[in-house]
Image (cartoon, helix red, strand yellow):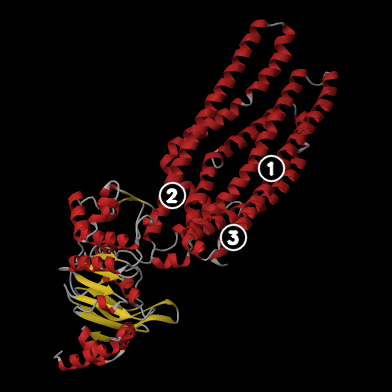
Amino acid sequence: MTAQHEDDVIGKAYDGRLMRRLLTYLRPYRRQVALAIAAIVGNAALQLVPPLLTKTVIDESIPAGDLSGLGLIAALYLGAILLSFLLEFAQTWTMQIIGQRVMFDLRMAVFGHLQRLDLRFYDRNPVGRLMTRVTSDVDVLNELFTSGVVSVFGDVFTLAGIMAVLVWMDWRLALVAFSVLPLIALITQWFRRHVRESYRQVRTWIARINAFLQERISGMATVQLYRREARDFAAFDGINRAHRDANVDSIFYYAVFYPAIELVSALAAALLLWVGGGWVLRDALTLGSLVAFLQYSQRFFRPISDLSEKFNVLQGAMASSERIFTLLDTPVEISSPPGGRLARRGAIRFEHVSFAYLPGEPVLKDVSFEVQPGQRIGIVGATGSGKTTLMSLLLRFYDVQEGRITIDGDDIRTLDLASLRAQFGLVLQDVHLFSGTIAGNVRLGHVDITDAAVRRAVDAVHAGPFIDRLPGGLDAAVAERGSTLSVGQKQLLSLARALAADPPILILDEATSSVDTETELLIRDALRVVMDGRTTLAIAHRLSTIQDLDSILVLHKGELREQGTHQQLLARRGIYHRLYELQFASTGGAASVSGSAEQSQQTPA
């Protein structure tokens, strides 16, 4: 079954393995659960009292003219109702609090696990579906804990108690009351079968709504640019309509089920009146017993309908828990080894590294090179040559499949993961900013970076002037994904972020692409500040940005084909030379390229 349709499967109505695992989330709150169960059982017991008091009044107090007895029974009746109210309040309050806390714990567990999963997992799983796990699926489990798993005790105890009292009072009339149970079973089975399918449809379509909205809202600029509003509106209309229709179907089944239960309850009452009334006329049954039977019959069918609804809650909870636990059980393939050493600043070595995202389609093939501390290395190559993959492997977003990467002789897979990544500052072409403030996006939660350090960092990368123009300066609000800032401004903030963190190794991935010439000059000057004294790995398409670096690596179809300085690579008249020609020949640079190459051949390497 494909991952795309895993939300279509609703699973078993009950799975003991899943339920046992779910109940472990109640362990921290076992005292509150015990209190709720005691309240539920106590309330169920109190539901048996009023009909018995009514029977006593009709059969004993009224015929005897005992006014004092009537007063006492009335007080007991009122006391039972008030105590039942208090117990129901305690049950509802306690279970709702437990449900909220369990929901909090589950969401934290899921989010914490999502943070540890490697990027390969996110390559395979749409964000919309993952959001459904953390939101809708956890909400379903909250309903299970608040009105399902513990409340069932109350319904079962009420049913058992009523049946026992009815048999105790008159087993013959009890059989009359129970004679409608086959009808109840048929109606309940019809309801369960149909509502199960409609519930599955609701869960499926809400997951698709989430996925569709996340994708379209994130790509709204593309939607508007290519004038897809009408098409996407029509597509969303279809998904939303299907979700509505699925809900309408479930409403229909509920609308039939509850009146049907009431009808059967009325049928049971009619049978009791017909049979029991005849027995009363023949003095084979007291009038009080008949009235008590009628009251118990009304109470008898209410928990049956509640249990049928809780079956639906249980059904959805099993499906949601299976999806959540499948996510939680997804192995964390990249993690710190037990007793992992702390990363030290040292030489970076790629030793015969090969890697493929898909089996049989290698992205890197037997790549080997070394970067000394403080050295500045440029990495160039055509799109898809493996440049960014090199950096992803170095940061352990993915693990190498052949060969190894070392820092100061230590395989990075033996290093503490947090310590390893703390060595790097990353400046990407597509800068990700979080909603919050300018200072918060530079600091990124590192409390040890003071306001003064943030100010020095933004000034050093020439971000100070545009920040000072914003209302609030460093405390200016940043919208989601930094949508109110230009590409260049976000790039400057990314550089300030790297400078404030003060990492020993800097990775630049197309840091000056997609910006205007003026901003590019600012970013280049800022880069000189940020790279000063740091090991630097710079991926670039614009060769002009890496000409003065210490060495340049040229990747071609996943292989390291050339390595050297700018002048050395031009002199070889290989791949780098062709890339240089392609970028500058249109402005008459071909002649200058040849001249540069000839001059470089006369220059000692």
Q: Could you tell me how far apart the alpha carbons at marks 3 and 1 are, in whole angstroms?
A: 36 Å
Q: Could you tell me how far apart the alpha carbons at marks 2 and 1 are, in whole angstroms?
A: 30 Å
Q: Residue at x 18, y 79 (%)?
A: 550
Q: Is residue 605 left or right of residue 591?
A: left
What residue is disc 2 on?
A: 107
- In the image, farthest residue toward the front: 588
Q: Closer to the camera, 232 or 463? A: 463
Q: Is residue 94 left or right of residue 332?
A: right
Name the secondary structure under disc 1: helix
Q: Residue at x 28, y 47 (%)?
A: 475
- Could one spot residue 326 in this view of the protein? no
Q: Label 3: how many residues lie within 10 Å, few (<14), some (14-19) or many (20+)?
A: few
Q: Residue at x 55, y 63 (%)?
A: 228
Q: Could you tell me how far apart the alpha carbons at marks 3 and 2 are, in whole angstroms?
A: 36 Å
- Return the x and y of residue 48 as percentages of the image width and height: 64, 26
- Return the x and y of residue 247 as percentages of the image width and height: 65, 48
* Quadrant of the rendering where the N terminus is positioned: bottom right
Residue 230: numbered disc: 3
* Quadrant of the rendering where the C terminus is positioned: bottom left
What type is the residue that disc 2 sits on? Arg
- Could one spot residue 541 in this view of the protein? yes
Name the secondary structure under disc 3: helix
What residue is disc 1 on?
A: 254
